[in-house]
Structures are given as C-alpha cells and as structure tokens.
Amino acid sequence: MSHPLFDLFGRVAMVSGGASGMGRQMALGFAEAGADIVLADLNLPGAKVTATEIETMGRRALAIECNVSDVEQIRSMYRTIDDEFGRIDIVGNVAGEGAVGRPEELAVETLQDVLQNLVLGRFTSCQEAGRRMLKQGKGSIINFGSIGGWNSLGRGHTPYGMAMSAGIQMTRELSTEWASRGVRVNTILPAQVWNEGLRKRVAAVPELIDTFLGGIPMGRLGEPEEIKGPAIFLASDASSFVTGAILPMDGGNLALNAGGTYPGSPRAYA
Ligand SMILES: NC(=O)c1ccc[n+]([C@@H]2O[C@H](COP(=O)([O-])OP(=O)(O)OC[C@H]3O[C@@H](n4cnc5c(N)ncnc54)[C@H](O)[C@@H]3O)[C@@H](O)[C@H]2O)c1
C-alpha cells in the first residue's frame, strides 16, 4: 500500500511534453497516483496515445496541441484547463528544446529561439499556473532543468546551458515570491536519460557513451520512467515543506568532480 502523503486523487496536473519520454512517464506517474491529466505537446497524436492510456486507469485526460515556445498558445491552453477542469494543482514543465553551436559561430537568432522556448515559454506557463494556484492557495510547479544548466557540457551547448541555468534561477525567484501563499516551485535536473534523440546521437558517435558514463557514478544512463518517483514526491504533500529545491536526477553526476573517476568508470585507471 502506498503512503497517503503521495496520493494525488482529485488533483489536476498539466504536463508538457506528455507524448514521449519523461513527460509521458511523469503524466502516467501522476495518473497512477490518482490525478487527472492535461497533456500539452506539439505531437498531438502522441499526446492522445498517453491520454488513452490514462483513461484506462479511470482518470480524466485531455490532450492539447501546444507549442511551449508560443506565449499565446500557452495562455490559451490554461484557458482550456479553466473551462474543462476549473482548477490546476500540479504543473510539470517538461517539454523544451535546445540548439547546438559553437559560441563563436552561433547565430544570435538561434540563441533567441532557445531562450524563447526554455525561458519565456517556461515563465509564461509558471505565470499562468501561479496566478491560478495563488487564488486556490495551493499548488506545485515542477520545472525541468538539466545538469547542463548547472555546469558546462561544452560540445556547443552554450544556448541550452544558458537557458537551463536561467530556468534554475527562475525557480528560486518564483519559489521565494510564492512560498508564503501556498505555491511551491522546484526544479529537477536530469543527467543523460535515454530518448530517441540520444539513441541517434550515440549511434552516430559511439564514443559519446563512454563520455556520458565517465560522468555518472551509477555507471548507466537514466530511464524515462525514473522520473516518476521524484515527480510524484514534488507534486504531492510528501514534499509540503520543500520549495526552491534543485533536485538532481543524475546517477551521482553532479557529485563527481570532472577530474574524478569511480569504480567501473570507463576512465578509471587507478
Ligand atoms: N533526456 C535527457 O537526457 C535530458 C537530460 C536533461 C534534460 N532533459 C530535458 O528534459 C526534457 C524532456 O526530455 P525527454 O528525454 O523526455 O525528451 P523526448 O524527446 O523524449 O520528449 C520531448 C517531448 O516534448 C515535445 N516537445 C518538443 N518541443 C516542444 C514544444 N516546443 N512544444 C511542445 N512540446 C514539445 C516532443 O514532441 C516530445 O513529446 C527536455 O526539455 C530536455 O531538454 C533531457
């Protein structure tokens, strides 16, 4: 039997990126814990597949086509949530995309697109959710970050790292502004977690896998379903005194110094 502190029954959660990967798994996890779910994604057919799976659990689910770079589409999605559910208790801002490019060659417009998606889009979702949650006197927002927003990944990740880092500070600012009024805001920082894009990159450059594993003391990459535990914890009353937290979900990556190794590391020689 699960502990009642993790019960999300009667709550409404919006998860962006709910068509695949960690967004999909977060949405399924919230539904398993009892919540009704709104899935926002560019990929509407994919979001509908997740919605159908949630409905078979006996929960309500609504898939909405929404580009999280587009401020007006985000606002319109929250108006739909008002009409369909009349409340919002949990938000998982998961969908987001970076772009790669060496800083000396990067088009400023590329940086602008990434900031629009990961900073302005995320802020708009937090603002829309926060306004509603403040009226309710309760709510939990989970922003997705990345280990690449904490320290540098290199390999042309300047736009992604800058944007993810801004998201971390946004979480600190919003949590401070809203904590005394019942709204909690936290961030999860994943290390490399398997998804379709990552499989393609590793297939194209097989040496990458040793680079990733060299930084993860657990000696493996993450699986998308491993988001469920941290997400349910942060969404639920189990974390009622937790806000402004930056929670790594990284197999130990951020604890390891870039010059360090661990037993079994591909780079261990001593
Ligand atoms: N997988 C990793 O290794 C990793 C590590 C750290 C951070 N992250 C971040 O976590 C998030 C999700 O990663 P994932 O592995 O689950 O990815 P994924 O590729 O499996 O899923 C991303 C989902 O977001 C949707 N999406 C993309 N752009 C969108 C947009 N503009 N508007 C609406 N929906 C959009 C896609 O259609 C897809 O369903 C991303 O922000 C990513 O940067 C991923």
Image (spheres, helix red, strand yellow):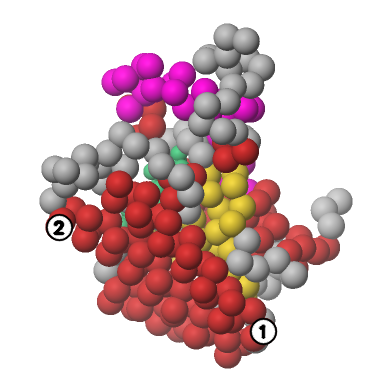
Is 74 left, or right, of 220 in this rendering? left
What residue sits 61% from the left and 52% below the top? 247
Quarter of the image holding residue 59?
Answer: bottom right
Which residue corresponds to mark 1?
Answer: 180
What residue sits 67% from the left and 57% below the top? 232
Looking at the image, is 173 positioned above or below residue 35? below
Residue 109: mark in rendering:
2
| SS under mark 2 | helix
Percent from the top left, x then y, of residue 211?
Answer: 44, 23
In the image, the segment drawn in magenta is 201-228
Mark 2 vs 1: CB contact within 8 A? no
Percent from the top left, x then y, of residue 71?
Answer: 29, 73
What residue sits 40% from the left and 66% below the top? 122
**Which part of the image, by quadrant, shows the C terminus?**
top right
Tell me the kind of residue under disc 1.
Answer: Ser
Q: Is residue 260 visible?
A: yes
Q: Is residue 223 magenta?
A: yes
Real-space Cα separation, disc 2 to disc 1, in angstroms: 38 Å
